[in-house]
Image (spheres, rainbow, N blue to C red):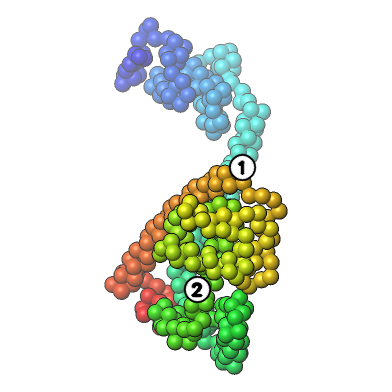
Amino acid sequence: MPSKISLSKGQLPESFDIYEYSSKYSDRSLILRLIRISEACPGFSIDCLRLAANDLKNNTYDTKLYLSLLRNINFIASQSKGKDEEGMTNIDYIDEEWVSAIDTKVSEETEKIEQELSIYRAKMDKDKVWASMLMNDYDTAAGYCKKVLSSKLSIPENSQYVLAKAAYGIINYVTGNYAEALKTFLELEYNDKQDFNGSLIRIDLFSPKRFDSLMALIKHNVVLTYIQPRSKISLSQMTKNLHFRSKNELISSLESLILQNIIPDARIDLESDLLFVEYPSTITNSSSDNQDISNSKFQSDDLDLKLDSVKSQISKSRSDCVYYSICNIRALSLTNKACLMRLNLYKDNLLYSRRRHENDPWNQ
């Protein structure tokens, strides 16, 4: 710990060594102490100011203080006794080269820092403008979406075109061309005012005779899709997997397919509770002539393993879909909460909107 000295009377101890004292401090602390000692003790003025000037020159860029110290040194030296002899030898010459180099360096650094500051300010202004634009877009997004929706719904529809499409779809439906009928109906705009129960009632009233044939075709396609990979199938397992109400219903469906020559090589074994399909080369579909499903014999054991693997992969993908669906539902829930909070703020006049007019969705 450096020892304390008293400068109240302008005197220092006889054993005081300015060089030893200056070795205990550094930087601005040393410079300020040396200047204070030079002001309080004239006997140490020149030595203290020289030490301070050297430290300024070696460790700082303060050229103004350096020039001031050098002027004080020369002034004190000129006022001392023995000016012609000792005084002239005490004059210190200013290092003009160092002062010029430091001033140039400081000027360059200052200019560089100012350029960086201006770039940073410009970037900050851009960020503020960008944030303001985002806030404005968020504030007006709902209104714009409603305007677009209203303009879309206000376009008058060509009723003759719609009726023609509907008539064409009905003709395809009555003649049994269900694929073309479905395509035609899907091209028409969906009316969200029609409920699901009303749709079922209209189907039942319009085509009660066609409904049973459609369901039979769907069941046949499901059964064909299930038996195609295998040559030996368990009837009980098939009833469970295809969600038939009973095994007899499945057997009647299989018998219908065999009699219609859709799966002519199939054989039902009620004792072993199995369905055998021996080397089928083609399977006839009700809506097409022939469909090639295999070029070689079926290997039931390998296919069972493969189907089990596929089943496990399907279950995993379903679980992943459920997980992501839950995440989406949570995100929608948070969005709805934010919208409700914003709606309450608008209703309580706690949030100002520049678009508060009749088209503002929050006022409706």
Image quadrant in which the C terminus is located:
bottom left
Q: What x and y, as percent, mark residue 68?
A: 52, 30
Residue type, label 1 = Lys
Name the secondary structure under disc 2: helix
Which residue is at 57% across, 85% downward? 174
The single residue placed furthest to the left in the displayed view is 348
Which residue is at 68% across, 61% downward? 282
363 sits to left or right of 86: left
Q: Quadrant of residue 43?
A: top left
Q: Which residue is mark 1?
A: 112
343 sits to left or right of 302: left
Which residue is at 61% across, 67% downward? 262
Q: What x and y, as percent, mark residue 71?
A: 54, 27
Res. 184 in view: no
Q: Quadrant of residue 155?
A: bottom right
Which sits in the foreground, 198 or 76? 198
Name the secondary structure under disc 1: helix
Residue type, label 2 = Met
361 sits to left or right of 96: left
Q: What x and y, as percent, mark residue 244?
A: 44, 63
Vertical side of 4 occupied by 172: above or below: below
Q: Which residue is mark 2?
A: 215
Which sits in the foreground, 93 or 322? 322
Mark 2 or 1, which is nearer the eye? 2
Vertical side of 202 occupied by 135: above or below: above
Vertical side of 332 occupied by 166: above or below: below
Mark 2 crowdedness (10 Å alpha carbons): few <14, some 14-19, many ≥20: few
The single residue placed furthest to the right in the displayed view is 295
Which sits in the foreground, 60 or 135? 135
92 sits to left or right of 44: right
Which sits in the foreground, 78 or 335? 335
Which residue is at 66% across, 71% downward? 288
